[in-house]
Image (cartoon, rainbow, N blue to C red):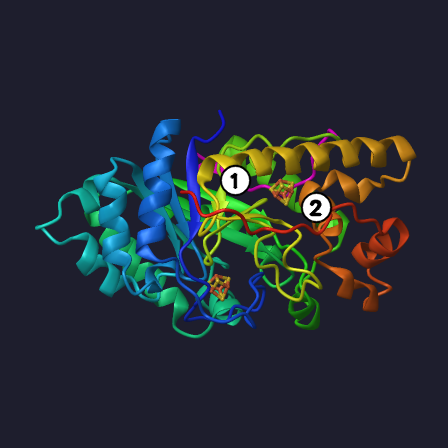
Amino acid sequence: MSFYEMSFELTNKCNLSCLHCLRDKADMRSYIPVELFDSILKQAKSYNLQHIAFTGGEPTLHPHFSRIIDTVVKYGYTYHFVTNAWNFLAVWKILNDPRFPGRLSKLSGVSISLDGATEKTHDYIRGKGSFKKIMQAISILKIKGIDISVQITINKKNFHEIEQMAMLASELGLKRLFYAHLEPTDRAYEQDLVLSPQQYREAEQRVERLKSVMKIEINFSLGHHEPLMFFQCRALTMYSPNVDYKGRLTFCCQLSGYTDAPEQELDTVADLNTVNLYDAHKMWADMIHKFNIDKIEFIKSGGATDLDYFPCFYCSKYFNKIDWIQKYKDDPWAKDYIKTKHRHAEKKHISGKKDR
Ligand code: SF4
Ligand code: SF4
């Protein structure tokens, strides 16, 4: 089901500095202009798109967050947003404003990043006070009956809390719980957060067991080990196009603004400030086609390894996001990278005629 929803990184600004953050902090702070956002949503209507997702940075820090939500409501989409909850009381005032009932009626849920089953673990990763802010946000959302999802990014510091996390989510009465693998970053290595591939697999098996015994809905986010080498994820089936904080359509939200990447542009499809959504869509389809052809060639070459069954790890190599990993030469991910180092994505111009 392609083009079902669109995901927007409203801003790259964030009020936290989480140890495992994937986003490039060096880039200048930017926010999607409301006018551009409006224009994209208007064009998206012709796809009968249903839903808008907001990520960041911290999306609620967009200075015109209320206008952004009102634009979603104006075009009749539902929406949800991902948040670290630090800014939640201010956001709640906007959402709960009785003059704008659509802000709540179109809100399908809130997704909160919770990185530990205990205050100590979560705050170690996300900063002191974060856990309390999340519990406060959850209690407000629960009173209003709004669906709450939480996502935990598994790393060395919370690996032992995988089961405890499901218990906590269940006790809190949350709608669903997502587990995600940590995508490697230089800082995550420095902080000793990165698990081995065997531990990634162990985490997946433990989550699989939880799925069968817990009543709460449990999922593993994209990036886990796939049994098929030619796996087609949500990005590759164009289910949820991602627009970054500069207003550019990117190949996939997982790769967008990847910190310490030697080249940030390789996964940029088109600048929607200058290219209309339909032409950008065609460019994305071409890029996915090239990606798939290159992957078939890679498989044919016999060079694929066990770690290429982690599809996001494959992509991080393909789009040249993790070249720095070579300095951790004894690490299994780095060894694989050095062994299979390959890159097929090509640089291209992303500007175009202004015709949206
Ligand atoms: S992980 Fe999310 S909340 Fe944490 S610093 Fe990065 S963008 Fe902000
Ligand atoms: S990084 Fe690659 S495999 Fe992972 S979600 Fe994005 S496109 Fe799909």
Q: Label 1, on which residue?
A: 280
As drawn, the residue found furthest toward the bottom would be 128
Which amino acid type is marked by label 1? Ala
Q: Which mark is residue 48?
A: none
Q: Label 2, on which residue?
A: 315
**How many other residues sit within 10 Å of disc 2, few (<14), some (14-19) or many (≥20)?**
many
Q: Is the magenta stretch mostly helix, strand or loop?
A: loop
- Work out whether residue 142 can be spotted: no
Let me know if residue 227 is in the magenta part: yes
As drawn, the residue found furthest toward the top would be 1
Q: In this view, does 217 lie to the left or right of 211?
A: left
Task: Tell which of 228 and 177 is nearer to you.
Answer: 228
Location of residue 95 in the rendering, given as x and y in whole percent from the top left corner:
20, 53
Which amino acid type is marked by label 2? Cys
Residue range (magenta)? 214-228
| Whether the residue under disc 2 has CB within 8 Å of ligand 2 | yes
For mark 1, give the secondary structure.
Answer: helix
Please name the residue shown 69% across and 72% down the image.
Answer: 190
Location of residue 51 in the rendering, given as x and y in whole percent from the top left corner:
36, 36
Location of residue 101 in the rendering, given as x and y in whole percent from the top left corner:
13, 44
Q: In this view, does 94 lie above or below 202?
A: below
Q: Do the residues labelled 1 and 2 touch (CB within 8 Å)?
A: no
Alpha carbon separation for disc pair 1 and 2: 21 Å
- Work out whether residue 305 can be spotted: yes
For mark 2, give the secondary structure.
Answer: helix
Task: Tell which of 155 and 228 is nearer to you.
Answer: 228
Please name the residue shown 34% across and 41% down the image.
Answer: 41
Please name the residue shown 84% across and 37% down the image.
Answer: 298
**For marks 1 and 2 on the same chain, the one whose residue lies earlier in the sequence:** 1
Mark 1 or 2, closer to the camera? 1
Location of residue 336 in the rendering, given as x and y in whole percent from the top left corner:
85, 52
